[in-house]
Amino acid sequence: MTALSAIFIRDMRLAIRVGGGALMGVLFFLVVITLVPFAIGPDLALLNRIGPAILWIAALLASLLTLDRLFATDHEDGSLDLILTSRAPLELVVLAKGCAHWVTTALPLVVVAPFVGIFLNLGGRAGAATVLTLLVGTPALTFIGIIGAAISVTLRRGGLLLAVLVLPLTVPILIFGVAAANAAVSGPIPFGTPFMTLCGLSLASLVVGPFAAAAALRLEME
Amino acid sequence: MRLSGTDLTCRRGGREIFAGLNFAVSAGEALMVSGRNGAGKSSLLRMLAGLLHVTHGKLDLADGDPDLAIGEQAHYLGHQDALKPSLSVAENLEFWVGFLGPAIASRGDALAAVGLDTIADLPAGYLSAGQRRRLSLARLLAVKRPIWLLDEPASTLDAAGQRRLRDFMRAHLVAGGLIVAATHASLGIDGAQELLLDQLSPAFAQATGSFGDGEALGPV
């Protein structure tokens, strides 16, 4: 247990220090969201309709942005060798790293989402629903992305491969996340149906992600 | 405790690095692995650490902890120092002690032993190569593991650092530890076993033969 808290605390520290990914993800998220109204123009009805989708796509790209370095830095400086030979189960180490990544990268997005939602004319009920879907849906993005990060760990420019591998797998999360946010505003389906499916996807990826990523890491290190 | 390898073969990238390797080291003994570049010194250590699969032959640890793999009872000190430049010296050590734990020496004592206690708050990114190596060594002192796998441990250390390393290794052996070190230079451990990998790598024998005869490298 101390091993897992040690790695969780280390990854948190690394993310918030200079060169860490925490601030970069949020800034990227803000920039993308800010650009959309400029591109689309002051059509409030349209912005409101596509708002949840824009927030979701921006969150997806922002979490991918920093994910490719998750194992790559540990691989380059030799930390991964020590992690692989340690007594701590690799699956749980991956889980701890994923949780640290979610807390430092995805959670700040959820926190700023209500404010940047204003740019997209997402106030009140629509804004709250979108933020709620982001809160329960972003763990799925992190833990599906972590598999791609583990597969591309030994590649120099793994970020590109990561995007190609991971983005298709995130389609269901995107569909149910945006569907739930839309359902809260306009219907016709109740909010609960897609929202519960989104929760299910998150929980499933929380279980599958660490095992798949750990298996990929063991295979890569040969 | 006795670590032994029988008829070990190492293949990497489909090429045979060494074959038919036999060795045995008991508690309190050191094994110095030498050989030219590419002879498989690092591969042997990675094999012992469990980072490379043993494709042929057998690795065995007698009287160790039966529930743990060899690598889990060993400290592996590779070419890379496994340090994060944005964390301070103390934070780097604190992480590895917490991760590998439990600690047998306090963080301050371990840093003092390697001579880094005065710069404990400095980010590791500012350290020189030798200081980075010293910080990696602090990990070996702070957490107890019976087996030390050292890959060129002295390569970046200054004379004082090499003396300290020799003292650490001697103390580890006296305490009943076991050391396998890949090295070009003598580390000054009395009574250490020598293992020369050169004769065991058939794929390279011809190539080095021609270098040894002093032939010029012709156009390939």
Image (tube, coloured by chain):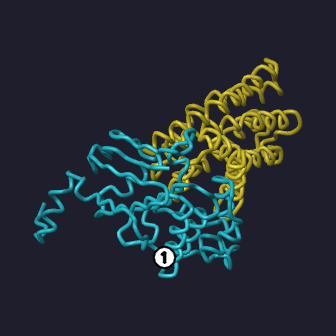
Chain colours: A yellow, B cyan
Q: Nearer the viewer, residue B182 or B13?
A: B182
Side of A107 where A80 appears, left or right: left
Q: Position of residue A49 (x, y in %)?
A: 76, 33
Q: Position of residue B84 (x, y in %)?
A: 60, 63
Residue at image point 47% right, 51% down: A157
| Tag count | 1
Q: Quadrant of the C terminus of chain A?
A: top left
Q: Is residue A96 above or below residue A13?
A: above
Q: Residues within 10 Å of mark 1 (few under 14, many from 20)?
A: some
Q: Nearer the viewer, residue A39 or B213?
A: B213
| Numbered disc 1: secondary structure | helix
The extreme top residue here reads: A189
Side of A195 where B18 appears, left or right: left
Q: Position of residue B5 (x, y in %)?
A: 37, 47
Residue A38 appears in the picture as rendered: no
Residue at image point 29% right, 60% down: B196
Q: Quadrant of residue B91?
A: bottom right
Q: Is residue A94 above or below residue B205?
A: above
Residue A208 appears in the picture as rendered: yes
